[in-house]
Structure formats: C-alpha cells, structure tokens
Amino acid sequence: MQAVLWYDMSFSGPIRFSPHYQPRVWGGRRLETILGRTLPDACTPIGESWEVSDRAESMSTTADGVSLNELWQKHRDKVFGKLKSDSLRFPLLMKVLDASNDLSIQVHPPAKRAAELGGQPKTEMWYVAHAEPGAKIYAGLKKGVTRVQFDAALQNGTLADVVHVIHPQIGQCLFIPSGRIHAIGAGLLIYEIQQNSDTTYRVFDWNRLGLDGHPRQLHIAESLASIDFEDFEPCMQPDVKEGSLVRCEFFDVRLCVAAEQLGHQGENLTLAVTRGKLNLAGESFCAGDFAVIPSMMPDNLRRITSRDSDCQWLEIRIPY
C-alpha cells in the first residue's frame, strides 16, 4: 500500500519495470552478452524480453509491486497525460528480441479481419540494435509474386523463395503494418514497438521442431486471410542520425542523440536506451534499459545530466 501511495502522491521520477523473459526456439543469449542482463538460467534460449507490457500473461510491475495496468487504470492523467484512449490496457507493448535463428514467416491480422479470425491486430516497428554480417529480414513479397505462386511455394516448402529479403544495418528500422508477411532472420538484436497484441499467425516455420520436440503450430487459413498480397518489396525506413523514425496512428518513435532533456512536464513518453549510458533524475540508464517518463515529472528532473559520447536512445510516444 505504501508503494501505491508513493506513486499516487508523486510520479516525479522515471518508472522502471522488471523484464519478462520469454524462451523461444529461435532465441539466444545476446541479452546477456550484449546488454549485460542476468538471464534466468545458463542455457535456455531467450528470444524476447517484454519490457513494457500490460498483458495478463506477462504484466510489467515495478520493484514496489505496482503494475502497469494499475498505473493505466487508476493514475492515467498523472502518468500518461491527457491521452484520448478508452482502452482498458496500456495500448503498446515494447520488447527486445534476440534472434539466433530465423523466426517463423508470419503475419499479424489487419483490423478489418482480426475479430472474425479470433485475434487482435498488430502493427509494429523494429529498430536494429545489433546485426551480424549477412543477417536478413524477410518482409513483404518479391515483386510480381502472384497468389498462385505463393500457394505453390507454400505447398512445396519453399515459401522463403517468394518473400522479399532485406540486409539491415545497425541503426536502421522497419515499419511492419498489420497484413505484411515478415520474419526476423538470425543474427539480429531488435527493439520492437507494437500495438498491445500477441496475435501472430505462422505460415511457415522452416520445417523445424519447437523446444518441446514437436512441430510448432501453423495457422495457414488465418495467415492467408491476413496477408496483403499487394505488398511488394518494402524498404527499411530512410536512415536518420536523429529525429523521427516511425510515426503512425499507434506510436511515434524518435531516435535521439543530442537532446538535453526528455520531453517536457505534462508530456508522457517511454525511454529506451539503445547504446551507451545516460544519467537523469539521479539514475543511470544503460543500453537495454526502458523507463516510463510520467507526465507529472518536472522539467528539472527530465534534464540529462551526463551521457556517453556515443549514447543513443528512443523516445516512444502514443500520439494524441
């Protein structure tokens, strides 16, 4: 109860949450080797770290035991400002993904089809924090691929041959609207900002077994009903050294390297450090750290008091 009272009275500093680590057959250990995390054990492949999550299966909670949903439901104006949202949950989900093997080729349902398919729409963006030489992203279809060719590739196990391949560089980002077929390739560490949804339809999983030794479930009918078959050869977003990466109706993500403070009093955002270290409000934030900056946090505590020369971070906002 004291923790709830403290937050209710103050909200004057950054709000941090404990990450939820998700084992995945395609996961690895880069959260440990690159970001310096202490993972749950020494051998399980960890594919996802859910950093800011208002989902019952992996609810973000502060060290004092206050959940993100409690902040959203009971202290919305003080923490998140005057957002025009009737959602019962914080509308975004933020993760760090470590792909040591290729993810399944998959799709998220568009809003117009999600309900009838029993899922939730999911538009997302990826920021590439680390890329091994030759790493790939699969996104959209190769130019000119027809539905007939797609179906044939699906039947004979060569679906990867009809999906567009991108070779991303560190610091680039990609926008993935609902309906875009996609997969993260091996060798990538990615920050993912997405709608608060966990609906993924796998259309092809490289003919492999899951961690339980059995083939993972595919969702062929749902995938075919969701894929945008007119989505050909998307590109990474234009490179920027600082400024807007992606702005859509669900999120506004900016890359920052020289800002002197995080927004202004009355404004809510989420900080995600991608490189180096910065200090503000008497706290240090290193690569991989996330923190919600509440709307009531005063300007003097938003000022960055020091940072590494190579420090970079994302500022994630929900558009008003």
Image: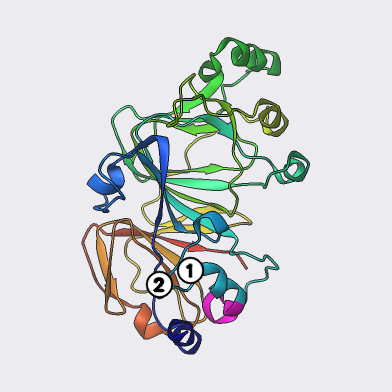
The percent coordinates of residue 127 (x first, y second) are 42, 47
| Residue contact at pointers 2 and 1, CB within 8 angstroms | yes
In the image, is residue 76 part of the stretch drawn in magenta? yes
Residue tagged 1? 269
- Find residue 262 and name its label: 2
Name which quarter of the figure residue 260 lies in. bottom left
By secondary structure, the bulk of the magenta-drawn segment is best described as helix
- Residue depicted at x 51% and y 24%: 215
- Of residues 252 and 14, the one nearer the viewer is 14
Q: Which residues are magenta?
A: 74-82
In the image, is residue 165 part of the stretch drawn in magenta? no
Q: Label 2: state its secondary structure.
A: loop
- Residue depicted at x 54% and y 54%: 57
For the residue marked with disc 2, what is the amino acid?
Answer: Leu
For the question of whether residue 299 can be seen, the reply is: yes
- Residue depicted at x 60% and y 13%: 153
